[in-house]
Amino acid sequence: MTGSERYGRLDGEHGEHGEHGEHGEHGEGYRGEYGGYGGGGRSVADGLRLVVRAFVYVVVGGVALIAIVTVASVLGPTVALDLYTPAVAAWWTVFTAVVVQGVPFLLLGTLVSAAIGAFVPEKVFTRLLPRNQALAVPIAGVAGVVLPGCECASVPVAGSLMRRGVAPAAALAFLLSAPAINPVVLVATSIAFPGQPKMVLGRLVASLVTAVVMGWLWARFGREEWLRKPTSGGIGSSAVGWRGFLAGLQHDFLHAGGFLVLGAGAAATFNIVVPRSLLDVFTGSAWLSVLLLAVLAVVLCVCSEADAFVAASLSGFSPTARLAFMVVGPMVDLKLIALQAGTFGRSFAVRFSSVTWVVAVTSSAVVGWWLL
């Protein structure tokens, strides 16, 4: 090997080493390290952007609310004098009561729903619930005790469970049981019926039986084309973390809130259309009184945390009839039907609500005859 060839070989090795060896590795590591810092910077920037956006929404919304209140305070008295009648006042009272009762728990439900979609992995639910739907349904029904909310909250949570891979039969059992057997409702029932623990037990048993039976019925006879499975909506709904949480919260709350208002309006209209004298006809019959209060529970749309006090005030009706009022109300009422139609489709809401009403009334009658 000549001298020139030897030096040429050394130069080639040195060039290769300089291009692909330690310097290349260090350069790549340097870029990767600072690339990581760049990713962290983008995360901070995204967080700041979300905070600024939320602040702008609050400011703009606050200014709009102040403007609306100002205009209403100026024009309100004039308009009220033209429109005020006892019927309108009664309608507005019922409508406001239903909405005010429902919105806080609707917000609770959408918070839970958004948190499930953004932070809870799908494998958690598949591990907690058995693959066999016949076993998953009663477990999901008993799990309803963990959500201290009303029926407004259960619909978005059940929809989120379906999106996370939970079988519809189990999610529907949870939807029915959550607003009826949670601790807040049971404590309220015990306060409304002091010294009557059988009424509390009757509500718990009849509600849980109804939820489980409906879950089993759906698992056996339900069809996929009847149920429109909810999908994540809104911009960024497929994201996880806080971005996905905010997107899911906005979509679910606005979507469900509209149907809550629709159901509240229907309940208020019924209250001013049906005469009270017609209701007195049914109090003389034990069976007719059960059916009447079961129908009233559908149209009055009383929140599950408050319906026990309404039932306790209906002293002219039998205990079984009042039990039916408390069992049917959290599972089938106008605002709940509207929420189900908006979330799962009208075809599902009509079929599911109708069968649920029959099962709930039957369960209430059997449990009432047994305990009360």
Image: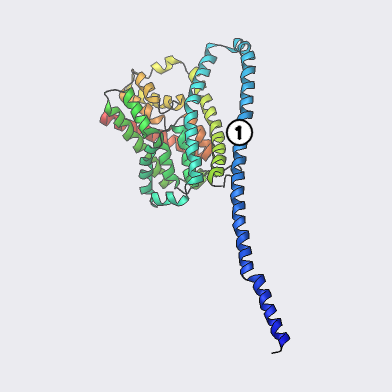
Q: Residue at x 32, y 24 (%)?
A: 191
Is 119 on the left-hand or right-hand side of 319? right
Instruction: Name above or below for residue 44 compared with residue 358.
Output: below
Q: Residue furthest bottom?
A: 1
Is 100 on the left-hand or right-hand side of 310? right
Position in image of residue 143 (x %, y %): 37, 41
The colour scheme is rainbow
Residue 279 at least partly seen: yes
Position in image of residue 37 (x %, y %): 60, 52
Position in image of residue 74 (x %, y %): 64, 13
* Nearest the eye: 146 or 9: 9
Element at label 1: helix
Q: Residue furthest right?
A: 4
* Nearest the eye: 330 or 225: 330
Instruction: Name above or below for residue 327 compared with residue 91.
Output: below
* Nearest the eye: 261 or 238: 238
* Nearest the eye: 56 or 161: 56
How packed mark 1 is, by other alpha carbons closer than 10 Å (few <14, some 14-19, many 20 or more), is few
Residue corresponding to mark 1: 55
Instruction: Name above or below for residue 20 compared with residue 284.
Output: below
Q: Which residue is drawn at 68% across and 82% down?
A: 9
Quadrant in which the C terminus appears = top left
Quadrant in which the N terminus appears = bottom right
Q: Give, as a three-letter code, the residue at label 1.
A: Phe
Q: Residue furthest top?
A: 81
